[in-house]
Image: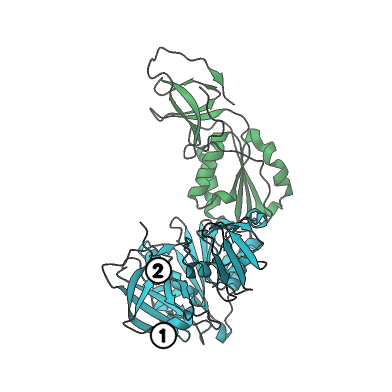
Amino acid sequence: MSIDSIPVRVMAIEQVAPMIREFKLEAIEGRLPAFSPGSHVQVIMPGASREIRNAYSLCGDPATPRRYSIAVRLQDVSRGGSSFMHGQVNVGDQLAITPPANLFAPVMTARKHLLIAGGVGITPFMSYIPELKRKGADFELHYLYRSSQTGAYLDQLQQQLGSALHRYDSVQGNKCDLTAVLSGQGPGTHVYICGPESLIDGVRSTAAALGWPDSLIHFEAFAAPEPGEPFKAQLTHSGKTVDVAADESLLEALEREGVKVPNLCRAGVCGQCRTAVLEGDVEHRDDFLSNDERSSGSCIMPCVSRAAGKHLTLDL
Amino acid sequence: MQIDPSIKSRPTYTPPELVATAGLQLFVSESDAEHLLEPLYRQCAESGAQWLVAEPGNAPGTLADSLSGYLQHILNDAPVTTRLYVAGSEGFLWDIRNQALSAGLVDEQIQLAPPISSARRLFCTHCYTLMEGVTASPHTCTGCGRLLLVRDHFARLHGAYVGVQINAEDPDEQPEQEVLQ
């Protein structure tokens, strides 16, 4: 049996950066499940017109899973999730979350870990660091932020890490020279990136140009599904027709209509929500499917991808 | 007895290709397999390439000490962008690969050329003896004397194929020997 959701209570809310708020969550009944470094949960929020689910990394120490912490950045263009968390959630409120899942675990056999965080992308590393320190692992944190908006947990990190913390505040004009960071590393060094797509792309292309093997580069994007044109999804098994609005994902529209599709990351990377397409062209926006699978047009990742035309027929 | 030729653990090999972006091009071969790496080595700038050559016929499961020590020395100071190309007998390929993994390399960085012969290293599952140069099955174990069926199941840890007694029910039975592919 799988657990769909866990009711939790908001114990505390703290502004940890100008645009980032941290929420401490405790179980209403029993204990929260244990989690591993790099895990995330989805927070299930009642939006204005539909339920919104956003994935957030757990940013506490995995050794003390009695309470969870998540940090939410208020997005400039919010689809409702971050503005709900910032504007409407108060201490004592009840929220529903999914059990933790992990798509971004550290490779504990690595000789050295290079952590690269952009803005609120510091969050998964807040669960890595206590574990890496316990194991006596060799690691460095390169933290890129804009102190006018982000830069959460800096004091705490400075205290814990000392010279292993490298800070780059773009407001002060501090740039991170990725070539310098990635050069001169020894065998068995693994790189982990969490941040905006531009940072992930920058690190990956710099590493590739320097000759790094792909399997040493790990990344987690926190992109919400981009909006697109509205379209209709025809479901062959249930006979339903689902209207997908411009600002919602196909997955969200299916869930609104009570159609269950397994999912974990809601960002096009984990592969859980893969759905067979029987008719219609797909605009693929995921990082999961192979090029062959994309060009065959036989499947879609509904958490991020959409119809290229006005309709899709799905094997659901 | 027929063994499925598509057994999953049996490695497949393709000729190595040079990865031009490597920070260190490291070649390791047995002396009778040099021709497999020579064309790649010639494409490299001299400054960024090193080649270690071993005499063939190293002891089962252990590299010649001098080569192993020298390889370790290089790997300790190697950049993360190192690419390793290996040629020789099958057991040798996997010994080098295993040593590289323990130094932190990942399989993506290591290319093993097709082995120079179909002779196998054999691991006896009864007494754990490793034997080199096995070309036919069944094969008598040099450790415990059992007659071993040489399976296609390959143990990467040992760089060896697995041997199990073929006539456990009736040790007097002597099945006909077949040449291994």
**Tag 2–tag 1 contact (CB < 8 Å):** no
Query: In the image, which disc is placed on residue B141?
Result: none
Query: What amino acid type is highlighted by mark number 2?
Result: Ser
Is disc 2 surrounded by few (<14), some (14 to 19) or many (20+) residues within 10 Å? Answer: many
Q: Residue at x 50, y 80 (%)?
A: A80
Q: Which residue is mark 1?
A: A88
**Does dot 1 land on a helix, a strand or a loop?**
helix
Query: What amino acid type is highlighted by mark number 1?
Result: Gln
Is A284 displayed left or right of B45 in the figure?
left
**Camera-nearest residue between A193 and A26:** A26
Q: Which residue is mark 2?
A: A127
What's the chain of the residue with tag 2? A
User: How many labels sit on residues?
Assistant: 2
Judge whether A168 appears above or below B20 on screen.
below
Q: Residue at x 51, y 56 (%)?
A: A188
**Camera-nearest residue between A257 and B117:** A257
Q: Position of residue A219 (x, y in %)?
A: 53, 65
- In green, which chain? B
* Sooner in the amino-acid sequence: mark 2 or mark 1: 1
Have a look at marks 2 and 1 and say if they share a chain: yes
- In cyan, which chain? A
What's the chain of the residue with tag 1? A
**Does dot 2 land on a helix, a strand or a loop?**
helix
Can residue A183 be seen by looking at this rendering? Answer: no
Is A70 displayed left or right of B5 in the figure?
left
Can residue A31 be seen by looking at this rendering? Answer: yes
